[in-house]
Each structure stands twice: as C-alpha cells, then as structure tokens.
Amino acid sequence: MRTIKALLSVLVMALTLSGCKTQQQEPQTEMPAADTEVISETKDGDETVDYLVVVNKLNPLPENWESIIKTVTVTNQLGREVEVEQTAYEAYLKLKEDLEKEGIYIDLDSVRRSVAEQQRIMDDFTKEYGADYAQKYVAVPGYSEHHTGLALDVYLIVDGKTVIENSEMEAHPEIWEVVHKKMPEYGFILRYMPGKEHITGYGYEPWHLRYVGVEAAKDITEKGVTLEGYLGMVKETDPKIDYGNSSIYTKEEMDSVITQIKCKFAEWKGCELKRIRYAGDECTAKENVEWLNTFGDTKYVKAIEFLMDFHTAKDIQSTMEPDYDYNYYQWWLGQTEDGSWDIVSWGY
Ligand SMILES: [Zn+2]
C-alpha cells in the first residue's frame, strides 16, 4: 500500500485541447464538391505578417496581430463561413487541388477565431456550465493558434460523405499520410505531431495544418521537429517512455494518460522532460482511489501513477529548484465512470 501526499499541487486538471473543434455538429451531408467562394476581404495593414509566429499555451497572440493580417472569408461546403489569412488560403487552394488529383478531398472546417470571439465562447460556457467546466474545455482567449488565421482545421470528404468528427477522421490514416506528405510543398506543417505533446501541449491532430511558408515548412518537416524546437524556443528532446509490466493497462491506455501528462508538462516553461515510467499495478489499490476522491467532488473509480524525470529551467518561476534534476516526480490520475482520466495530483 502506498500513502503518498502531493505537496505541490492539488488541482484537478484535465487537458483541454484548445480551441480546435469546438463546433462540430454539422449534419452528415453528401453535397457535391462545390468550390468555396471568396465573399469578402477584410483588414488592411502595412506591417509584415510573421508566418513563423508561435502562439501556444505559453505565448499569446502578438498584440498588433489582428491589425496586421489580411484575411479572406470563404463559405465551406457545409455552408459555413470560414476566415483565413490570405496567403495561407492561397496556399491551401493549391494543396487542395493537388490532393484532388490523388482522389483526396479536403475542406476547411475551422480556421480563424478572434480573441474576442474566444472570450465570448469562454463567457457563454462559464455562464452555462460554470468556471471549472469552461476552463477545462475552452482554450484560454489569446492562447490559441487559431487566432492567427494560419492554423487550418480541415475535414475529409470520403466517397462523397463528410468525415468531420475527430474519431472518424482518425480512422483514415492512409489519407492523412498523403495529405501530410504533400503539405510542406505548399508551406504547411503538421503542427501537433504524435510524441511531441511535451513541447506543443497538444495531442496528435492530423487535421490541424499550420502555414509557415514553403522554405520553413520543408525544413521543419525534414528535421522532424516542432515549430518551437525549430525556432530554438525549447530544447527538443524526446523522453524515454517506460511502460513497465502491467496486467491492468494496455500500452494504448497508458499512452492516452501519458499524453495528458506531457501536455501539462508543456506548460512548464524551459523544463526538459527526460523520462516517464509507469509506477506499477499496485498503485491502483483501493486506498489510492479513495485518496484521489478526497481532492474534490469528482468521483474516481481507478487510479494510475506515473513517475517522471525532468530538468528544470534556469529561470523557473515556481517553488521548484531552478536548473535542477527532479527524479521520480509523481503524477496521479483518476479515471471517472465515463472512462476519461483527470490529472489529480502531481509532486513529491
Ligand atoms: Zn486546430
């Protein structure tokens, strides 16, 4: 039996994956592939757009961004208006055309959302479901790459049918493979790659394309790095993952938990993740489940623990030692009745 007290934090966390895909209740339609139509042009400015801009959980949208970019608003095949940065849109059209030669059909789902619009969504959710829920499921206004107009969520049209739900899209890896292979040629990168969650803060999103320009896209893709790593904002190392021997959890189940931990770790600026290891089946003991249930109102039915080795940043702003190796740092997660996992506690 283990009785472990977390010293540093007792927040119930669940990771919310950004502003991607919050509106996806479109009906399944079998529309003919009508061309998207440019219906308006907005904004003018004489400063240059930085196509390598990084907007993530640590870096907000630059203040002057919204006054600089030129966007176009187009209607997608589902009849919804979508706003895209102009150069990114032109590149997207070329990519789309090329893919169609291979029999692959994509369309824009969600692209630009202004900070004000994100704030409205946050306010609506807070009013409707409370602040905890809103913080869990809505991206913090200002910190979503979708504000830039350079991040494009696309959906697929397969055999004339709309494939737009995340799980349905994930069921077509062979299509994404072709899309991802062609993207750099038109200036796009796959922004949220599998295995890089500790740097980007997001799990794998095959549908989220980011425009950076052709030269950078080719270079980044060839190097297999994140945008953050490419720009030298982080030391891009991949942690060792040790799944141990479990008779309770499969590797896939562990991966979904590890992804959450890595996404949270991405918020620890300048820290380097070295290793994550499964702490063992004995951690699922009833006592530990009961202990996790003392943290708040959420009822957990299972417990899981992972141990992490990492090195802290020299200028870390927290109670942690700067420039220091932390080993066997504990992460406790609880599984709710609906099967999802929450990070409940982390620390020594
Ligand atoms: Zn997205």
Image: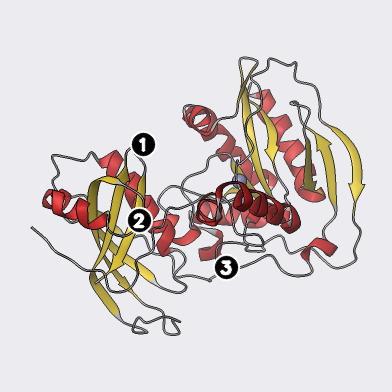
Name which of mark 2 and mark 3 comes first in the sequence: 3
Look at the numbered disc 1 and give the secondary structure of its residue: loop
Kind of residue indicated by mark 3: Leu
User: Which image quarter holds the C terminus?
Assistant: bottom left
Q: Nearer the viewer, residue 130 or 56?
A: 130
Q: Is residue 207 above or below residue 222?
A: above
- Residue 178, given in percent of the width and then of the height, sits at 55, 32
Q: Is residue 97 visible?
A: yes
Label 1–label 3 contact, CB within 8 A = no
Along the line of sight, the residue nearer the viewer: 293 or 82: 293
Q: Residues within 10 Å of mark 2 (few under 14, many from 20)?
A: many
Name which residue lies at 53% across and 40% down.
206
User: What's the amino acid at mark 1?
Assistant: Asp
In this picture, residue 256 sits left or right of residue 215: left
Disc 2 target residue = 343
Q: In front here: 171 or 235?
A: 171
Residue corresponding to mark 1: 338
Dot in front, 1 or 3: 1
Lower sequence index among marks 1 and 3 = 3
The mark tally for this picture is 3
Name the residue at 11% across, 51% down: 282
Q: CA distance from mark 1 to mark 3?
A: 40 Å
Numbered tag placed on residue 231 in the rendering: 3
Q: Does residue 119 lie above or below 254 as drawn?
A: below
Q: CA distance from mark 2 to mark 1?
A: 15 Å
